[in-house]
C-alpha cells in the first residue's frame, strides 16, 4: 500500500514538474507577445484639438517611426518627448496631449517600432534605440537636451529612465512607473523563474539614481497593473529635486483631471 502511494505521489510530482516546465517554456517564447500590445485599442474617438505635424524619424537600424510634433516656440519653451506605454496607438494618447496646448511647451510623441503601422518588432533594446533616435531628431531641430523633458508612461517609464540616466535633460516625468519588469512579471507570475526567463528587464530601480534632472513621479494607489508600491519606491530612491503626484483612486491609466494638470503645470513651471 505504501509503495503504491509513493509511486502515485512521484507520478503526480512528475506531472506537476512537466506542466511547470511547459508553462515556463511557453512563457519564454511568447513573452514579447504578452508584453507588447500594439493592436490594443482604447481609443474613444477623441478629437485632436492641438495642432500637430506628422513626421517620420529614422532609427539607426533603418526603421521609420511615426511621430506627432507640435512646435509652439522652441526658443522660449521646453519640449516634451512623450514615450507611451506597451499598448495602443498614438490616438490612444489624444486625451493627454490635447492638454499640452494649454501649457507653454512643444512636444513630440513617437510610436514604437511595431506600433501604429511602424515596421519592426518591439524589444527593450529596440525601444531604447527608438527613444534615442527621437532625441537626436529634436537635437537636429536645434533643441538641446537641457530643453527636453522626457515623459514616460507605464512601459515608457522604463525607456525614459534608461535614456535619462547620466544625461542633462530639463526634467523627467514618470507616469505609473515600475521598479523593473522582473518585479512586475513576478507580481503576475510569482511561481515562475522570471529572472531567468525574461528577455526585456527594464531595470529602472538600478538606473534611477543615475538621473540628476528634476523628476516628477505620478501614480495611483489602485493601479491594478503596476502596484503602487513600485512608484513609491522609484520616488523614494530618486535624487532631489523630485516631486510626486500620488492619488488614492487612480488606476493604471491616470485621469487627466484638474489636480493632475495642476501638478504637471507646477512641475513644468519649476524647470529652468
Image (cartoon, rainbow, N blue to C red):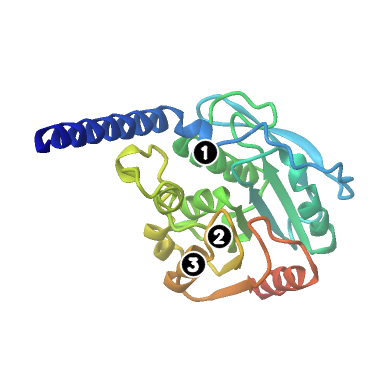
Question: Distance of mark 2 from mark 3, alpha carbons?
Answer: 26 Å
Picture quarter containing residue 78? bottom right
Q: Nearer the viewer, mark 1 or mark 2?
A: 1
Q: Nearer the viewer, residue 15 or 144?
A: 15
Helix, strand or loop at mark 2: loop
Q: Which residue is mark 3?
A: 229
Mark 3 vs mark 1: which is more N-terminal? 1
- Evaluate if marks 3 and 1 touch, with contact meaning CB atoms under 8 Å apart: no
Residue, disc 1 = 35
Q: Residue at x 56, y 53 (%)?
A: 225
Would residue 249 be seen by someone viewing this image from the given angle? Answer: yes
Q: Residue at x 34, y 43 (%)?
A: 192
208 shown above or below 125: below
Of the numbered discs 1 and 2, the one sitting upstream in the chain is 1
Location of the C terminus by quadrant is bottom right
Q: In the picture shown, does residue 35 fall above or below 114?
A: below
Instruction: Using the image as rendered, state which of residue 12 and residue 112 is in the foreground.
Output: 12
Q: State which quarter of the image contains the N terminus.
A: top left
Q: Are marks 1 and 2 in contact (CB under 8 Å)?
A: no
Asked if residue 272 can be seen in this view, the reply is no
> Would you call the spot at circle 1 few (<14 residues within 10 Å), some (14-19), or many (20 or more)?
some
Real-space Cα separation, disc 3 to disc 1, in angstroms: 21 Å
Please tell me whether mark 2 or mark 3 is closer to you in this view: 3
Image position, residue 46 (x, y; %): 86, 46
Q: Which residue is mark 2?
A: 169
Q: Nearer the viewer, residue 159 or 193?
A: 193
Residue 47, percent across and down?
89, 45
Residue 63: which quarter of the image?
top right
* Mark 2 or mark 3: whose residue is earlier in sequence: 2
- The residue drawn where x is 23% and y is 36% is 13
Q: Residue at x 44, y 53 (%)?
A: 187
Q: Position of residue 59 (x, y in %)?
A: 56, 31
Amino acid at each position: 500500500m505504501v509503495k503504491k502511494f509513493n509511486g502515485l505521489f512521484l507520478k503526480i510530482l512528475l506531472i506537476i514538474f512537466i506542466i511547470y516546465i511547459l508553462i515556463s517554456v511557453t512563457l519564454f517564447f511568447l513573452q514579447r507577445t504578452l508584453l507588447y500590445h500594439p493592436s490594443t485599442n482604447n481609443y474613444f474617438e477623441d478629437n485632436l484639438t492641438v495642432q500637430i505635424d506628422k513626421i517620420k524619424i529614422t532609427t539607426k537600424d533603418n526603421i521609420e517611426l511615426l511621430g506627432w510634433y507640435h512646435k509652439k516656440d522652441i526658443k522660449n519653451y521646453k519640449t516634451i518627448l512623450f514615450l507611451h506605454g506597451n499598448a495602443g496607438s498614438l490616438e490612444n494618447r489624444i486625451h493627454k496631449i490635447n492638454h499640452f496646448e494649454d501649457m507653454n511647451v512643444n512636444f513630440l510623441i513617437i510610436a514604437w517600432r511595431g506600433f501604429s503601422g511602424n515596421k519592426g518588432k518591439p524589444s527593450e533594446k529596440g525601444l531604447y534605440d527608438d527613444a534615442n533616435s527621437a532625441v537626436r531628431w529634436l537635437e537636429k531641430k536645434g533643441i538641446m537636451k537641457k530643453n527636453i523633458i522626457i515623459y514616460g508612461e507605464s512601459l515608457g517609464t522604463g525607456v525614459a529612465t534608461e535614456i535619462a540616466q547620466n544625461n542633462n535633460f530639463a526634467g523627467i516625468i514618470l507616469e505609473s512607473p515600475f521598479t523593473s519588469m522582473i518585479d512586475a512579471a513576478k507580481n503576475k507570475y510569482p511561481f515562475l523563474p522570471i529572472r531567468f526567463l525574461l528577455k526585456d528587464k527594464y531595470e529602472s530601480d538600478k538606473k534611477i539614481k543615475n538621473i540628476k534632472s528634476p523628476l516628477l513621479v505620478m501614480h495611483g494607489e489602485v493601479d491594478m497593473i503596476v502596484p503602487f508600491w513600485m512608484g513609491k519606491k522609484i520616488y523614494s530612491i530618486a535624487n532631489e529635486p523630485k516631486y510626486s503626484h500620488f492619488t488614492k483612486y487612480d488606476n493604471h491609466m491616470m485621469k487627466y483631471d484638474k489636480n493632475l494638470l495642476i501638478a504637471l503645470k507646477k512641475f513644468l513651471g519649476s524647470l529652468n
